[in-house]
Image (cartoon, rainbow, N blue to C red):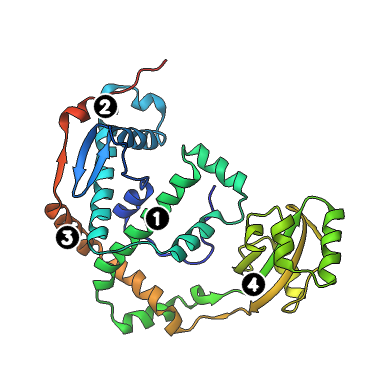
Amino acid sequence: MLATSPMRTKSILPVVILILAAALGCSEKPAEKIVATVGSMTIGESRLREEIAFEGSKYDPEMISTKVNFEQLKAQALEKLIQEAMLLNEAIKLDISATSDELKKEESLQRGSLTDDEISEALKEKGLNIDRWREIQKKRIIMTKLIQSEVLDKVPVLDADIESYYNDNIHQFSLPTHFHAKQIIVDSRELAEEILAKLKKGGDFAELAKKHSLSPDGKNGGDLGFFNAQSYPPVFSEICHKLKPGEISDVVETDYGYQIFQLIDSRPARQESLSEAKPYIKNLLAEEKSADIFKKWFDDLRAKTEISVNEKALAEVLLEEKK
């Protein structure tokens, strides 16, 4: 399973969650039959079939083996793709995009501590590859930013309400210890000890990590960035707690292999202030008030978006018989 954030995350309106979950792309092959056009975007037959398969994987195969149920599933899949295309089309008009930093942050968040092989296997189970997965993340970021700017940011929230929420839920704003560390993971103690010896003689941690580490972060010099001590295996925080910035640990045997850590910096546990928590609380309260506003905005968006469905091409997307 792909990782989710251990910290607070902002929820998205339920209807949007359904759309984002299906954000697998609307680009088509040149000679493909087009089943629908939404603004400047097209939805091709293969994309619709892909979405039908994605939606169908949520049900018992026997439930969608009849023509009636398949047609319902097809209509559901097409509607989801149309809604997705509406949002992306509007984002293009408003020049909303995903930055490289946002994409890197999202990929790091979703990856968690998974290796390349583990993430490839997880994606394979969903019928995806790494490129399509990255495309999903990009579209998710864009659509979330669109809804944030066009709906949530425009919902009025009083400062008094924000302060009241903060005081009533003060425990939510206790920040655990965070560490910024680098790591090297290898599969033999002998190699780990050789690397440690080089480090003690002044070897560059990042270069040795790039050369030897088996962890995905090895290509980044083993840099884990700042991480929540509660979100990683206990051994990570136990070791980092004992180190001072710049210090390197001894070789440690863990479930992942033989590891060496270097502490870069740390942030002690503390209480998040009201001013720090304000953006999160404001967005949370705005979402609670935004259901009606979102519905009107989405209905208006649909009304102004030119949508056409090629009924002939759609009718030719049939239930495939079992071989």
Nearest to N terminus: mark 4 or mark 1: 1
Q: Amino acid at mark 3?
A: Lys
Of the numbered discs 3 and 2, the one sitting upstream in the chain is 3
Labels 2 & 4 near each other (Cβ < 8 A): no
Mark 3 or mark 4, earlier in chain: 4
Question: What percent of the width, then of the height, locates residue 219?
Answer: 64, 58
Q: Residue lying at the far front in this picture: please name it.
A: 30
Mark 2 touches mark 1? (CB < 8 Å) = no
Question: From mark 3 to mark 4, how far is it between C-alphas?
Answer: 44 Å
Residue 258 point in image, percent of width and height: 79, 56
User: Amino acid under label 4?
Assistant: His
- The answer to whether residue 204 shows anywhere in this view is yes
The amino acid type of the residue labelled 2 equals Val
Q: In the rendered image, which residue does mark 1 sit on?
A: 138
Badge 2 crowding class, 10 Å Cα cut-off, few under 14, some 14 to 19, many 20 or more, is some
Of the pair 118 and 269, the residue shown nearer to us: 118
- Sequence-wise, which precedes: disc 3 or disc 1? 1
The Cα atoms of the two marked residues, 2 and 4, are separated by: 52 Å
Front position among marks 3 and 4: 4
Callout 3 crowding tier (Cα within 10 Å): few <14, some 14–19, many ≥20: few
Q: Gap between marks 4 and 1, in whole Å? A: 26 Å
Residue 155 left/right relative to 130:
left
| Residues at marks 4 and 1 touching, judged by CB atoms closer than 8 Å | no
Disc 3/disc 2 C-alpha distance (Å): 32 Å
Can residue 250 be seen here?
A: no
